Image (tube, grey):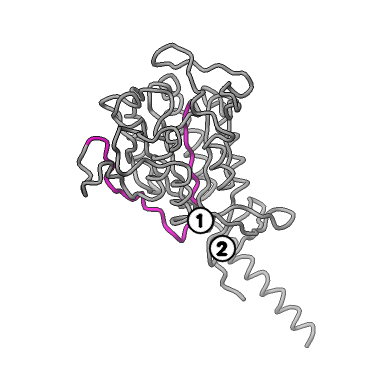
């Protein structure tokens, strides 16, 4: 009886292993990936490299690493009010909503061009809020979204059941509007509904894709990873923040490519930069990828390994080709 039981147990294990192998072909965990591109004049020299490398070193590896991953592309400059932005600027625009088919995204990416932006800080925080919430922004509070600088509500299609929403923000330099204490009239005097500050971005995250931690199996045991919205800010240099006196971290200098003058970032010097603060809040990071994105592939590989997670109803199984998520059929 024991021999028969052992044989049945062995056959059962072989069958389950075979089933797991088949399911694993279709069962890698999927994420939503949102690309936010700063297309102001300050990034004009960077955008051509972004357009090339994002396809080869970003979209392709993430697609291969997780079948069913959906991608979205949005862009921003700044609000079209002097001195913050020019007449053709915009605070946020959806280029391609979330979709596993990246054909439209790649077409939209190729069509992007850099210009405008006014001063050095831009509407990065509002772009983040809109990408997450899609809530729109009625600046003058008149009940519509038809006025200069308004942003119409538009959802990217974030699925609440998606375990991870990875947000990659390509921007430069790391100077941001809106600091309410010193920019009470941004983007114009008398504004009713103000653009997002750091706390508004956090509120959007908490409402749509709150950050939590989960334990998943990885090679050698379990590891704790973040779930929810995770923000990665990608910049060309090693610059991370400003010193408290307004000088640049690591004594680097930044030249405004629109004016050729040294950027005056002192009014925006805080203890922490918004990118750093949001990265810490979400479990993401501020990462240098080089001016030609030569470090992008390595960053993507690291993010994929650090954020691999199984969606609800799936369990992780280690196979020779990697960790896969399969339907939890057996209890």
Q: Is residue 170 magenta?
A: yes
Which residue is nearer to you in this view: 244 or 90?
244
Q: Which residue is mark 1?
A: 210
Residue reaching furthest top?
260
Residue 113 % position (x, y): 34, 25
Asked if the residue under mark 2 is in contact with the one under mark 1, i.e. CB atoms within 8 Å, the reply is no
The quarter of the picture where residue 124 lies is: top left
Percent x, y of residue 41: 38, 21
For mark 2, what is the residue? 326
| Distance between the alpha carbons at the discs numbered 1 and 2 | 24 Å
| First-in-chain label (1 vs 2) | 1
Label 1 packing within 10 angstroms: few (<14), some (14-19), many (20+): some
Residue 83 sits above or below residue 105 on the image: above
Q: Secondary structure at mark 2?
A: strand
Residue drawn at x 39%, y 23% as measured from the top left = 119
Q: Mark 2 Cα within 10 Å, few/some/many (few <14, many 20+)?
A: many
- Which segment is the magenta one? 148-172
Q: Position of 145 compared to 327: left or right?
A: left
Mark 1 against mark 2, which lies toward the viewer? 1
Which residue is painted at 32% across and 29% down in the image?
Answer: 111
Q: Quadrant of the C terminus?
A: bottom right
The main secondary structure of the magenta stretch is loop
């Amino acid at each position: 009886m024991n021999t028969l039981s052992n044989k049945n147990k062995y056959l059962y294990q072989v069958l389950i292993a075979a089933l797991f192998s088949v399911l694993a072909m279709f069962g890698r965990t999927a994420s939503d990936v949102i690309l936010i591109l700063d297309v102001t004049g300050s990034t004009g020299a960077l955008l051509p490299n972004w357009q090339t490398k994002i396809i080869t070193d970003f979209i392709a590896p993430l697609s291969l690493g997780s079948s069913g991953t959906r991608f979205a592309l949005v862009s921003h400059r700044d609000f079209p009010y002097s001195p913050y932005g020019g007449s053709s600027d915009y605070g946020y625009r959806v280029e391609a909503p979330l979709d596993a088919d990246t054909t439209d995204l790649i077409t939209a990416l190729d069509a992007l061009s850099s210009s405008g932006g006014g001063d050095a800080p831009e509407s990065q925080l509002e772009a983040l809020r809109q990408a997450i919430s899609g809530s729109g922004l009625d600046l003058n509070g008149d009940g519509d979204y038809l006025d200069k600088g308004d942003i119409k509500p538009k959802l990217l299609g974030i699925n609440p059941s998606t375990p991870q929403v990875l947000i990659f923000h390509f921007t430069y330099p790391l100077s941001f509007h809106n600091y309410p204490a010193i920019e009470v009239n941004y983007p114009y005097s008398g504004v009713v509904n103000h653009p997002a500050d750091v706390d508004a971005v956090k509120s959007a995250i908490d409402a749509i894709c709150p950050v939590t931690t989960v334990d998943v199996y990885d090679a050698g045991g379990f590891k704790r990873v973040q779930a929810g919205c995770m923000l990665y800010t990608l910049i060309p240099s090693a610059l991370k923040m400003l010193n408290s006196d307004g000088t640049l971290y690591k004594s680097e200098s930044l030249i405004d490519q629109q004016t050729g003058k040294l950027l005056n970032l002192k009014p925006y010097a805080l203890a922490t930069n918004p990118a750093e603060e949001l990265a810490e809040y979400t479990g993401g990071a501020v990462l240098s990828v080089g001016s030609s994105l030569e470090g992008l592939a390595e960053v993507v590989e690291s993010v994929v390994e650090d954020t691999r997670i199984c969606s609800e109803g799936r369990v992780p199984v280690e196979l020779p080709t990697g960790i896969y998520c399969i339907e939890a059929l057996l209890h």
